[in-house]
Amino acid sequence: MQAEDRLIIALDVPNTHEALALITALGPRARFFKIGYQLMSVGGFDLARTLIADGKSVFLDLKFHDIGNTVEKGVASVRTLGARMLTVHAEPDVLRGAVAGRGDDPTLKIMAVTVLTSMSQESLARLGIKTPVETLVLQRAEMALAAGADGVIASAQEAPAIRRAFGDDLLIVTPGIRPAGTKADDQKRVVTPRQALDNGASHLVVGRPIVAADDPQAALGAILDQMTG
Ligand code: C5P
């Protein structure tokens, strides 16, 4: 797989006008885009349709979390869009519903959010969860695999343990990527694009290092070079 198909650019901008301007500025090497909450209710789905019709790949970061029956129907609706990836939370009933809703669609990959990177051991304890984060990530990855999901969202720090436990059976999408020599923003634990791939990530999600760059196309090119170099 080419670096361009492994790099997912997070369209974390306030409206579709800005998103389209950014996509134009990025040029043809930008092939895979993440659309999430920020664009969802202001034309994000129409943008997804436009991008897909244009031959781009779309990752819908909707993080579904509901009773299985509702998730199943929601995923069946998402299926009509032609997106490549959709996130849901890694709980058995949610995963079961999502996999049922995807059916035999070969395009849409169900990606399970293991543990949000904003969660610390202390915040988990407040929810009554005492399991160490890495153990919890592995348990949830196992649940995702057992339910028939296609992959997980996890930090690059957790990717090696996931690969060791489950081999190449799961896609691993990692956020928290910062090119060598750039600032971390609010990401607590960051790794470079090369490190993330070496740790076993199949895809990287990158937002601000590209979206907020003075020259987004140059920033994209530098990251793609670091992925292949
Ligand atoms: O700007 P930055 O590169 O930090 O953006 C990362 C993207 O990945 C954002 O869209 C963020 O919502 C998403 N994300 C994350 N950490 C997670 C899951 C998703 O940063 N655990």
Image: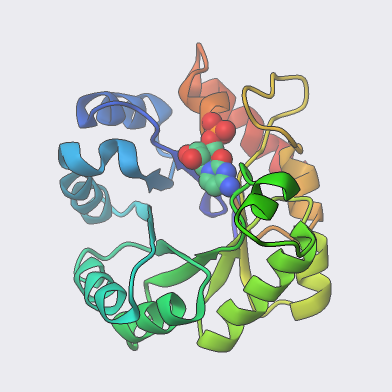
Residue 162 visible somewhere in the drawing? yes
Which residue corresponds to the image point at 23% horizontal and 76% vertical from the top-left?
Answer: 76
Camera-nearest residue between 200 and 23: 200
Q: How many marks?
A: 0
Residue at 21%, 63% (x, y): give it: 81
In the figure, is residue 220 to the left or right of 99?
Answer: right
Is residue 85 placed above or below 226 in the rendered structure? below
Q: Quadrant of ligand 1?
A: top right
| Residue 226, position as x, y percentages in the image | 73, 37
Write the residue at 40% across / 45% down. 33
Please, which colouring scheme is shown? rainbow
Q: Position of residue 10 (x, y in %)?
A: 45, 39
Quadrant of the drawing holding the N terminus: bottom right
Q: Is residue 29 visible?
A: no
Of residues 129 and 188, the one drawn nearer to the viewer in this rendering: 129
Q: Position of residue 56 (x, y in %)?
A: 34, 51
Picture coordinates of residue 57, whole percent (x, y): 38, 55
User: Which residue is found at the position 71% from the left and 20% from the top?
Assistant: 182
**Residue 25 versus residue 102: which sits nearer the camera?**
102
Is 4 positioned to the left or the right of 193 in the image?
Answer: left
Rendered view: 70 above or below 124: below
Q: Give the left or right position of residue 7, taking residue 161 as reference.
A: left
Q: Quadrant of the C terminus?
A: top right
Whether residue 19 is situated above or below residue 34 in the rendered picture = above
Q: Quadrant of residue 168?
A: bottom right
